[in-house]
Amino acid sequence: MCAICGVLNLNEYGAIEPEILRTMIAVVRHRGPDEAGVYIDDRVGLGHARLSIIDLSGGSQPLSNEDGTLWIVFNGEIYNYVELRRELEQRGHRFKTQSDTETIIHAYEEYGYGCLQRFNGQFAFALWDRRSAELLLARDRLGVRPLFYTISNGQLIFGSEIKSIGVHPNVSLDIDPVALREVFTYWAPLSPRTAFKEIAEVPPGHFMVVRNGQTRLERYWQLDFPEEGAEATTSIDELAAELREALIAATRLRLRADVPVGAYLSGGLDSSVITTIIRNHTDAPLIAFSVRFEDERYDEGCYQKELIKYLDTECREVTCSASDIARVFPDVIWHTEAPILRTAPAPMFLLSDLVHRSGIKVVLTGEGSDEFLGGYNIYKEAKIRRFWARYPESKVRPLLLHKLYPYLAQSPARAGQFWQEFFRPGIEDTESPYYSHVPRWRNTAKLHALFSDRVRSEIGGHDSTPDLEALLNPRIVDWDPLARAQHVEISTFLSPYLLSSQGDRVGMAHSVEGRFPFLDVNVLEVCSRISPRYKLRGLTEKYILKRSMQGEIPESIRRRAKQPYRAPDSPCFFGPNVPEYVRDLLSENGLKQSGFFDHDAVARLIRKCERRLGQPMSAMDDMAVVGVVSSQLLYNSFIERFSEKVLEAKRAPLNMTVWVDARNAPVCAS
Amino acid sequence: MTVRKVIKEFIFENFMMGLNENHLGDTDSFLEKGIIDSTGVLELVAFVEQTFGFEVADDELVPENFDSVAKLESYVQRKVSPGADGNASE
């Protein structure tokens, strides 16, 4: 889509260096390879890297209003820009481009901060008002597009990616051990924390106003659910129809582009819904892409083939092996800018590369469906545990857990009762808003045993619970259990990890913008009115979605058991053909460089993995390996070799199409 | 090496994730201490079968037999030399 970056003087009229802005843009050129642009005046510098999608010839940025008193840099799309523009033109605003970017400026002029409520889109932008000397930073409701900032030496420095900020001479990147621990518990740091000290993110659903040297963060949207029992009593058929119509409209909106738009096809329900809608309800050609795995335990090829045949479409595929993942993993971490516990972003990285090489810049994809329509196993697990908790001595109730994981390579049925006991701790603590997630977090947190003494002492007694609580709507205690689980999953997993490391970052690494019909504002509104029993009906996930698309998608896909998208994890990093970097980073010396992990513990882990080569690894060991390797890579790229990587990025020339230097110029009165 | 030592060494090498031996007492519950996860149980079963040469029946795969060093030692002793400890195992 694009990248934005900038520097704002908080107090004095210090110098804004054009060269620094140029470098800030250069390191995120992958997000916007088509054009670059800069606006500088005495107080602020704004930078932009463009991936041209709408109004190819006219929509260059930074963009201003009629008299140059408002300037914007924007990453994202406002899908309802056509309708908004019509409204604004009727109110007297004059547009000079065909871009959605310009709509934001005029909407701001008309509605102030309230404009954010009117945007159906995914966005991160910085809007500079020259007259009031106010900078507005804003991010979309769910954090689809990233936005980071720091304050250093009297300047606010912001960017779509942390590496842009890191380029500024006043910024010294330092990995945050508290963030490490949060990744090794919740899978991602708790917003607004990032993997780096001193770097924060503008949280999803928030905007920040910077004025007179002060920053003010405000929330404009929060996830909300009805009180338990107070859900609308609309009939399921009516709701299913509403959902279907909303999804069709959302898909159509997201096909708005001046370039061809593709779609991911995984063989699962969500991408099947989207590709079917494109085929049946729009005039757009269906340009499908999918990822295949060499290891058949992960491959969903047969389901993909079925859908491809049904839709009578072509589908370009990339096949991914464990060694492919190992090969690209350092690049993946350069883009995720955080440690990760699964290699799942790596095949997505390879997929976006295929999309880019096919000449496509935009893809529609199914993220959000599981979160908002009750698709995840964690929801079922919580339901079963609650059921079990009502009669804890039951031998029969916990057997339901076996239904959850038929796809696991090692049959959990064999481990019988023992395996069930794993889910028992805390089972009666049903009032906790985190009930659904406690087993996952408690399990993952065992990885903390890998940390070095130095990391432990730096973390000290820090407690992340207040930050976790601050993420959640306090009304969560009034919601039904499924809604609670959804909220926790959306806030701690979807926004900071799935949409980020596995979504935006690896897509934009190859200049590919992802668009998400299931995250459409109107779709979310319908979902918020759907009773939990229509989302998770018994143990049937996304019941209403399946019902709403009945007759349109193949029965086999509609009825297919849920198979979470996964990629090989620890096998990628062990064996005779493993790349040099893995050995180096996991060596005693390599571990000493970062100082994050205890050498004996890691050595023991490595021995176990080497002993068990070719055999399935436990989930804990997989997470441990990927977590350690990715943390080591993060240190290597952002601390040890950062300047080298910046120099590398600077070599590619920028196509600078906008250069506005308004330094020493008076602010024009309109 | 005693059965107990063999078991402890295996647990320590494979499941402690960095914690040292002091973190696990012989009667501490693996489940409560979070030492073994749902897939790790199968590794433990495979170890027991391969090291001590008997098959673990599905209905023997219960916390009473597997959930601590002491319990596991006791179970293995019963299987390897039935009746040796004088307690009937049903």
Image: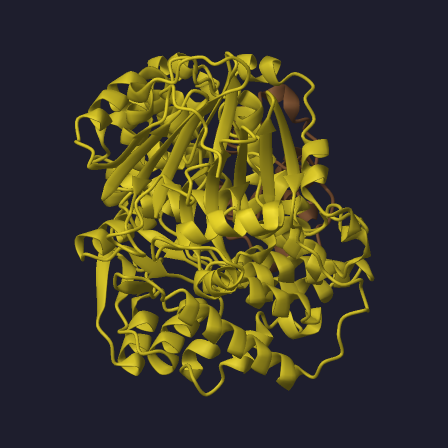
Chain colours: A yellow, B brown
User: What residue sits 57% from the left and 55% below the top?
Assistant: A415
Q: Position of residue A285 (x, y in %)?
A: 26, 74
How many labels were placed on the picture?
0
User: What residue sits 36% from the left and 65% below the top?
Assistant: A256
Residue A59 vertical placement versus A301 (above, below): above
Q: Nearer the viewer, residue A655 or A358?
A: A655
Residue A290 vertical placement versus A193 (above, below): below
Q: Nearer the viewer, residue A470 or A637?
A: A470
Residue A519 vertical placement versus B75 (above, below): below
Residue A481 vertical placement versus A531 (above, below): above
User: Which residue is most to the front?
Assistant: A669
Q: Position of residue A572 (x, y in %)?
A: 31, 40
User: What residue sits 66% from the left and 65% below the top?
Assistant: A528
Q: Position of residue A381 (x, y in %)?
A: 64, 58
Q: Nearer the viewer, residue A638 or A152?
A: A152
Q: Nearer the viewer, residue B41 or A553?
A: A553
Visible residue check, residue B71: no
Visible residue check, residue A57: yes
Q: Position of residue A440 (x, y in %)?
A: 61, 45
Q: Is residue A633 left or right of residue B26?
A: left
User: Which residue is most to the bottom?
Assistant: A551
User: What residue sits 63% from the left and 44% below the top?
Assistant: B66
